[in-house]
Each structure stands twice: as C-alpha cells, then as structure tokens.
C-alpha cells in the first residue's frame, strides 16, 4: 500500500513539474498582408543575391579579392533583409561594362593630344606642332 501511494505521489509530482515547465503565456495575433509580403520580398531579394554571387564572373572576382564563395554565401545568410536589399539596389545601379567605350575614347584623345604636342610619336597621321 505504501509503495502504491509513493508511486502515485511521484507520478503526480512529475505531472505538476511538467505542467509548470511547459505552460508559458502564448500570444496569438493576426498577421497582416504587409508583413507576409515583406517576408516574401526578403526571401526573393536573398535568392537574387545568391544567384548573382553564383555567377562565374562574380566567383572569379571574389577569388581574386581573397573571398571564397562559401564565405560570401555564409555572409549573405547572416545579413538582414535590409542589408540584402541595399546590396541588390547597388548591384542594379552598377554599370555592367558601361563606360568602357568612353574610357577608350578618352585615352585615344589624350594620346592624340600628346602626339600633337610632340610629347609622343604614336600615330603617323598626327603631325606635331612646332
């Protein structure tokens, strides 16, 4: 009889301890459409940045700078949604090869002017002023 009573008390004590540990206040509220859209936008921005980082030219550039692709992907995972959006915004506004023609024309113009002043003798069609 004592053994059964002790067993019953042990089970009741364990049950009370379990309820004391598990019960915590829970708060439920409505999730707005804006919050869902913001979370989805964050996932899309992160996926876009990961896709950009997985391009071969980006991988080569990162390796040239001493960054492994794995380290870059790990860093992107740790970024906040705002940081990812800011990087994607900057990447969208960076010129992809734009300006190369302008740079080549400026260099050509400088060389022609130097040739015309007699500093260099690169082009045969330019006669230096004397």
Image (cartoon, rainbow, N blue to C red):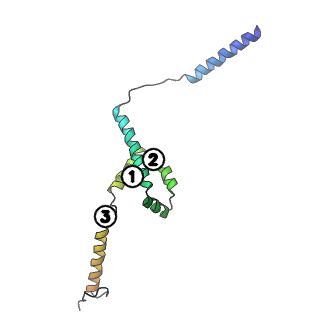
Question: Which residue has dot 3 on it?
Answer: 98
Earlier-in-chain disc, 3 versus 1: 1
Earlier-in-chain disc, 3 versus 2: 2
Q: Quadrant of the N terminus?
A: top right
Seen from the viewer's position, the closer of residues 54 and 102 is 54
- Which residue is drawn at the image coordinates 59% and 21% (left, top)? 20
Mark 3 → mark 1, Cα distance in angstroms = 19 Å
Question: Which residue has dot 1 on it?
Answer: 87
- Position of residue 62 in the picture relative to residue 99 (left or right): right
Q: Quadrant of the C terminus?
A: bottom left
Question: Which residue has dot 2 on it?
Answer: 79
Q: Position of residue 102 (x, y in %)?
A: 28, 70
Q: Position of residue 40 (x, y in %)?
A: 38, 39
Q: Is residue 112 above or below residue 55?
A: below
Q: Are marks 1 and 2 in contact (CB under 8 Å)?
A: yes
Q: Is residue 123 above or below residue 33?
A: below
As helix, strand or loop, the secondary structure at mark 2 comes to loop
Mark 3 → mark 2, Cα distance in angstroms = 29 Å
Q: Are marks 3 and 2 in contact (CB under 8 Å)?
A: no
As helix, strand or loop, the secondary structure at mark 3 comes to loop
């Amino acid at each position: 009889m004592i053994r059964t009573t002790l067993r019953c008390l042990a089970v009741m004590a364990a049950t009370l301890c379990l309820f004391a540990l598990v019960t915590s206040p829970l708060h439920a509220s409505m999730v707005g459409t804006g919050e869902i859209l913001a979370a989805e936008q964050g996932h899309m921005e992160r996926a876009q940045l990961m896709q950009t980082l997985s391009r071969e030219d980006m991988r080569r550039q990162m390796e040239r700078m001493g960054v492994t692709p794995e380290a870059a992907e790990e860093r992107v995972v740790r970024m906040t949604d705002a940081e990812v959006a800011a990087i994607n915004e900057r990447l969208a506004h960076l010129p992809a090869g734009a300006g190369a023609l302008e740079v080549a024309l400026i260099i050509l113009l400088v060389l022609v002017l130097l040739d015309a002043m007699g500093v260099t003798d690169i082009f045969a069609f330019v006669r230096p002023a004397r």
